[in-house]
Image (cartoon, grey):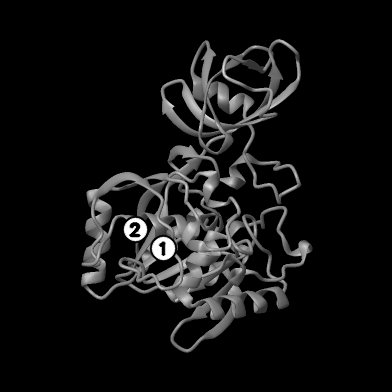
């Protein structure tokens, strides 16, 4: 398959710049794979498509304020470090700007010296390994100095940091939010639980590799970046038991899909495990653990659009996206949602 097979026309004004308030008042397009029907609703209508015995799988990763703006210590040149992955206590892998000036041995300073960064080595894809020097608690300093790493297509400043966090986020480590979960409110989640639907947390720390453009035309040549994931014994047991008893496993977001598909195999059972995954799901893939999906609308030619095309068929995915554009849905991270049944 070719990258260009997953292109579609998106007017720029449909790229959402700010989140909807309240969270669950975003729109919801519901697509049924059996009869290929489309319904136009709102996210608060989601419980109407769930039933007792189903499990709703959510990614409880928490976004860190990973974007640091400071200056090169010796020259005062403005610099930016975007943290991607903690390698050990004070050593991180990240992206830096300007890359040509931030070579190993360079020091940068942030918050008038509250935090210092030493570039210690080069990392894959133009990144750097960085060691931080500070007094106090790193997480508290990062929360004070760092900014939320919003995607480049969002041009407006985020007024409330919590709006780029799901209400169930717990474990810090992501450079981007699992955005399908941004639509949930505590009240909506409680309503779902009262129906007899179990909400099961898993973990995948989202890296920027998920959102990087595919730079090759032949998909077999594309290399996915790896991300850390975890499925607990309790989560695996709940998902397997629900499916065994006729319930569905409904994933919230493509990150939850990639977690479960990384932790399952040909026997269609989810295993309790943790590790790094670079799973790349494209049309022709047979899903082992996922029965339905709640997701946002994704970028043209992206690996995420390829994943949903594997679930609903490429031509159907593009047809539904064309309908969403016609109906003026809001796209991408702060946009509206789709449910694939």
Q: Residue at x 23, y 55 (%)?
A: 271
- Residue named by callout 2: 260
Q: Residue at x 27, y 60 (%)?
A: 264
Q: Is residue 180 left or right of residue 75?
A: left
Q: Residue at x 33, y 55 (%)?
A: 262
Against 204, residue 39 (above or below) is: below
Q: Secondary structure at mark 1?
A: strand
Pointers 1 and 2 in contact (CB under 8 A)?
yes
What is the x, y in percent for residue 231?
30, 49
What is the x, y in percent for residue 328?
72, 72
Q: Residue at x 62, y 68 (%)?
A: 4
- Residue named by callout 1: 251
Which of pointers 1 and 2 indicates the residue nearer the eye?
2
Q: Quadrant of residue 248?
A: bottom left
Return the disc, 1 or 2, that comes first in the chain's sequence.
Answer: 1
What is the x, y in percent for residue 245?
21, 73
Instruction: Let me know if residue 191 appears in the view.
Output: yes
Residue 101 disc label: none
Categorize mark 2 by other alpha carbons within 10 Å: few (<14), some (14-19), many (20+). many
Q: Quadrant of residue 3?
A: bottom right
CA separation, marks 1 and 2? 9 Å
């Amino acid at each position: 398959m070719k990258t260009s097979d997953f292109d579609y026309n998106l007017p720029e004004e449909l790229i959402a710049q700010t989140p909807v308030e309240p969270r669950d008042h975003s729109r919801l397009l519901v697509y049924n794979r059996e009869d290929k029907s489309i319904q136009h609703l709102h996210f608060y209508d989601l419980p109407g498509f769930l039933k007792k015995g189903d499990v709703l799988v959510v990614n409880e990763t928490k976004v860190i304020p990973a974007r640091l703006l400071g200056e090169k210590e010796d020259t005062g040149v403005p610099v930016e470090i975007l943290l991607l992955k903690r390698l050990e206590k004070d050593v991180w892998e990240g992206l830096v700007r300007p890359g040509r000036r931030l070579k190993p041995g360079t020091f940068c300073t942030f918050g008038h010296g509250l935090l210092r960064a030493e570039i210690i080595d080069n990392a894959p894809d133009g990144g750097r390994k960085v060691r931080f020097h500070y007094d106090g608690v790193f997480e508290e300093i990062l929360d004070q100095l760092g900014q939320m790493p919003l995607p480049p297509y969002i041009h407006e400043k985020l007024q409330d940091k919590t709006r780029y966090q799901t209400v169930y986020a717990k474990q810090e480590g992501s450079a981007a939010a699992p955005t399908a979960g941004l639509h949930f409110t505590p009240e909506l989640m409680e309503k779902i639980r009262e129906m007899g639907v179990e909400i099961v947390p898993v973990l995948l720390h989202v890296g920027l590799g998920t959102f990087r453009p595919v730079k090759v035309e032949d998909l077999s040549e594309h290399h996915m970046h790896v991300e850390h994931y975890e499925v607990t014994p309790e989560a695996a047991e709940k998902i397997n038991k629900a499916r065994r008893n006729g319930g569905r496993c409904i994933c919230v977001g493509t990150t939850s899909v990639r977690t479960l598909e990384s932790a399952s195999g040909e026997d269609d059972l989810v295993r309790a495990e943790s590790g790094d995954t670079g799973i790349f799901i494209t049309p022709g893939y047979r899903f082992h653990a996922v029965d339905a999906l709640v997701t946002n609308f994704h970028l043209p030619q992206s690996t995420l659009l390829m994943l949903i095309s594997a679930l609903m068929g490429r031509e159907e995915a593009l047809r539904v996206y064309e309908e969403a554009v016609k109906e003026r849905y809001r796209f991408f991270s702060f946009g509206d949602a789709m449910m694939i049944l």
